[in-house]
Amino acid sequence: MYESDWLDAINGGDTFRSTIEIEVTAEEIIDFARTYDPQPGHLGDDTAQETAFHGLSASGWHTAAMTMRLLCDAGFTDTIGLGVALAWPSATRPGDRLSLVGRITSKRRSQTKPEVGILGIEYETINHRGEVRQRAQATVRATESFHVPLNQ
């Protein structure tokens, strides 16, 4: 057994959250879309009215990028993503103020590198009204430098 107890201090069910909010603006939505996801629902309010969104909305990939910033704020800065499943249950809109809440779902020590932990996490990106804009399940690789404030 590896002698460090950092992984032992982490438990399934432990929670984490971002300490900042990201305010979504129409300009950022359109700029991101022009560069990375030029679909009508993201390029302007006029073109977006004719889509299933019935108004301007952020690309799911833009929401994912903002979520990554929120994950870093929550402390996930020295981990490596090993896989993720994403869902966007509702559209991110201009004026949304996004934050992140999540929990540890599983942990195990690597069989080949005992100094490495493999964590299962679930997290939601929510707006200021509590509406879920992104839901994710991920697996991350972490080491003893993992210092995410848990259960706060």
Image (spheres, rainbow, N blue to C red):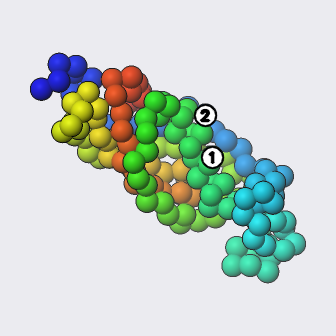
Residue 87 seen from this side: yes
Q: Residue at x 69, y 51 (%)?
A: 96
Name which of mark 2 and mark 1 comes first in the sequence: 2
Q: Look at the numbered discs 2 and 1 and tell me whether their residues touch, using CB distance below 8 Å.
A: no
Q: Which percent across, then down, holds residue 37?
A: 72, 63
- Give the CA distance from mark 2 to mark 1: 11 Å
- Which quadrant of the rendered structure holds the N terminus? top left
Instruction: Provide the residue designation for mark 1.
Output: 66
Q: In the shown orientation, is residue 52 left or right of residue 82? A: right
The type of residue carrying mark 2 is: Ile
Q: Which percent across, then down, holds residue 10?
A: 27, 31
Q: Is residue 5 above or below residue 90?
A: above
Q: Residue at x 39, y 48 (%)?
A: 82
Q: Residue furthest top?
A: 3
Label 2 neighbour load within 10 Å: few <14, some 14-19, many 20+: some
* Front position in the image: 36 or 30: 36
Quadrant in which residue 19 is drawn: top right
Q: Residue furthest right?
A: 46
Q: In the shown orientation, is residue 99 left or right of residue 10? A: right
Q: Which percent across, then down, holds residue 129?
A: 60, 52
Q: Which percent across, then down, holds residue 136?
A: 45, 55
Residue 41 seen from this side: no
Q: In the shown orientation, is residue 61 left or right of residue 40? A: left
The type of residue carrying mark 1 is: Met
- Which quadrant of the rendered structure holds the C terminus? top left
Camera-nearest label, 2 or 1? 1
Instruction: Provide the residue designation for mark 2.
Output: 20
Q: Residue furthest left?
A: 1
* Front position in the image: 39 or 136: 39
Q: Residue at x 79, y 80 (%)?
A: 50
Tell me the number on the disc at residue 35: none
Q: Residue at x 52, y 39 (%)?
A: 71
